[in-house]
Image (tube, helix red, strand yellow):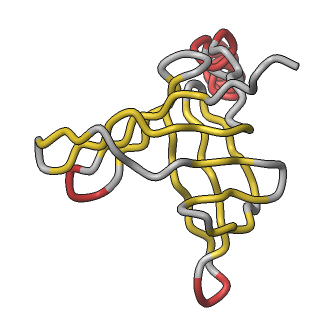
Amino acid sequence: MALLGLVALVVAWKMVPSTAQLFAPQYEILGRWRAEQTTLLDTALPVGPSLEFTNGSATVLQSQVPVTAYDRDGDRVHVVVPGGGGMEVSFTFRFEGQDKIVYEGPLGISMRYRRVKDAPQ
């Protein structure tokens, strides 16, 4: 009986979200972002493509791409876009604060972005 209670306790514990997820800030990726730095093979360059995320699309290099979903995972947001052959592709951005994100891609590519705040009206 004690073993059954222990198993039920472990199962219930696994079903509860981690405390990191419960207390992680829910930063918003929607909006415009300006590249601050691109790192390629340990070489940092002060350039990169600007980004804009809306409810149903992302704009990269003046090309608009449909976005299927924005999946949140703690301080990360996975931007899901349709890929070829009915598959979906995900690009993950990690928040370093409310107005800073980082994309870490393949082959040592890292891009740092800062939110573009609209001019006051």
Image quarter hosting the N terminus: top right
Tally the numbered discs: 0
Vertical placement of residue 65 versus 72, above or below? below
Q: Splitting the image into 4 quarters, where does residue 80 fall?
A: bottom right
Residue 8 appears in the figure: no
Vertical placement of residue 59 versus 38, above or below? below
Q: Residue 63: x and y, percent?
A: 62, 69
Residue 118 appears in the figure: yes
Q: Residue 96: x and y, percent?
A: 47, 20
- Give left or right: position of 11 versus 46: right
- Give left or right: position of 56 versus 65: right
**Residue at figure coordinates x 39%, y 33% from the top left:** 36
**Residue at figure coordinates x 56%, y 67% from the top left:** 89
Foreground residue among 65 and 79: 65
Foreground residue among 47 and 91: 47
Q: Splitting the image into 4 quarters, where does residue 12 fall?
A: top right
